[in-house]
Amino acid sequence: MPDNPLGQLAVEQGWITAEQRDEALRLQADLRKSGLFMRVGELLSRRAFLQTGQVRELLQRQGIALVRCAACGKQFNARNWSAGRGTCACGGALDPAPAEAPLSVAGNAAMAALGDAAPGKAAPPPGALRGRYFGKYPLLEELGRGAMGLVYKAWDPALGRPVAVKVLIDAGNPDESAKRRHQFLQEVRSAARLRHSSIVSVHEVGQSDGQGFFTMDFIDGAPLSALVREEEGAPPLAFEKSEKPLPHVIEWIRDVALALQHAHQNGLLHCDVKPGNILIDRRNKALLSDFSAARSLRLDLSDPNTKRVLGTLFYMSPEQARGVAQEVGPAADIWGAGAVLYLLLTGKRPFSGENPVEVRKSIAVRPCPSPRSLNAKIPKALEAIVVKCLQKEPAARYGSAKELADDLQRFLDGQPVQAPVLKEAGSAPFWHDRRAWIAIAAGVLLLAGMLLVKFVMSKGTERKGMYELPEETR
């Protein structure tokens, strides 16, 4: 297979191996068979063997510049080009392509045929983006994924430390793609407004070959969802290693509540508090993440997120489950925190159902089982906190996330909590007790017997008077 000048330069520079160069050439040949064309430099970049900047540098060594038509937007590789030289077929002037421009000079057809993370494609297989650069950040390993984005551990070469990179997965449907881009940008803007020790901070936003991404703190730990075991018979996480609830589990929800309070004070609702969005680091500290469902505290009809009710079904508040966006406020986030605490204490979600409609109906109208009915080891005061969070009416829950955090701290400090402590779970009214009915029946029979004796005695006295013989007279 003949050497490609750019590929060979990259090998000689030590940036890629000969095997990686040959793989790009084979892929180029396969594309040609389908009537598509893509330059080797672009293929090396798309396969994350080279950074975009490295490809540009190699092109410059060959006397080639990436230029773009100011009129139609088409890009070209131009040899020995200088400013003002040459025009596009449409007659437009050629200008240097901006630094963030993709390397493609053949349109999206060849890009889509690659089958990786090109726009319009489904999410790539786990780990498929490993080694690829987004901006200056090489992706190291996949940390997680959602319906809309992938999260990778990456390396910040400037600061010499790991970061997390969230990459947008574009949708094939244009309307859905537009919604995703808006929601993605909303997440970046929302999280960027917040600075709190229990919130994952966002640093930088950018694009790589048309894909949006942003960087945030890398948390050395795991999502809470990875720690919870929901299989039958598994002990609840809060009681996994002790007969009493572990203090750090209560501290996690307290810190989440403080993070929510900070968001609410900055005019933001999280709207998706769940185990998968709570990260536990190596210091056993909880951090709230993923503001992709966040919306303004004030109803803004120009914001699509405000009109839609977002969130994860099993942790939705009743107002979210009913789909009433106007009723969703800070109390919805308090419900979410309470639902997570319920899971940690009982090992089960507060509500379930055979299908999403059934789950929504349960959340909206049916009471959930009391925590102590599922786990009698739960202290009554802690149960009271959970039950207050999960009241159907928002006004009946805590007045603020700070009040929830304060009550959890009171419990940790051994002080009385503000939430009303419920009566012993499972205690029945006295009329449900069989022994009470036996006692009542015995009392009634005794009283009836006494009345009967009295009645008989009184009758006997009356008869004696009627038949009494008269006194003898002399």
Image (cartoon, rainbow, N blue to C red):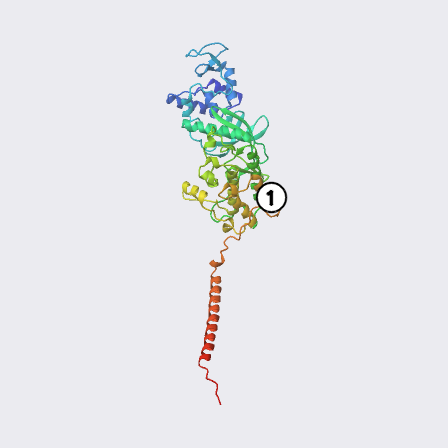
Q: Visible in this render: residue 164?
A: no
Q: Residue furthest left?
A: 34
Q: What residue occupies the far bottom of the structure in this picture? A: 474
In percent of width and height, residue 234 lies at: 50, 48
Q: In the rendering, at what x and y percent does residue 216 appear?
A: 55, 30
Q: Is residue 206 above or below residue 425?
A: above
Q: Is residue 402 above or below residue 207?
A: below
Residue, x 46% and y 79% (percent of image)?
Answer: 465
State the SS at label 1.
Answer: helix
User: Furthest residue to the front?
Assistant: 474
Quarter of the picture containing the N terminus is top left
Which residue is denoted by mark 1 in the rendering?
409
Q: How many marks?
A: 1
Q: Which quarter of the figure has residue 410?
A: top right
Q: Residues within 10 Å of mark 1 (few under 14, many from 20)?
A: some
Q: Residue 162: x and y, percent?
A: 56, 31
In the foreground, 195 or 16: 195
Q: Is residue 104 among the parts visible in the rendering?
A: yes
58 versus 370 height, above or below: above
- At 46% across and 65% down in the image, what residue appears? 441
- Viewer-proximal residue, 88 or 350? 350
Q: Quadrant of residue 171?
A: top left
| Residue 98 percent across, percent down from the top left | 50, 18
Return the residue nearer the eye: 78 or 204. 204
Q: What amino acid is labelled 1 in the image?
A: Gln
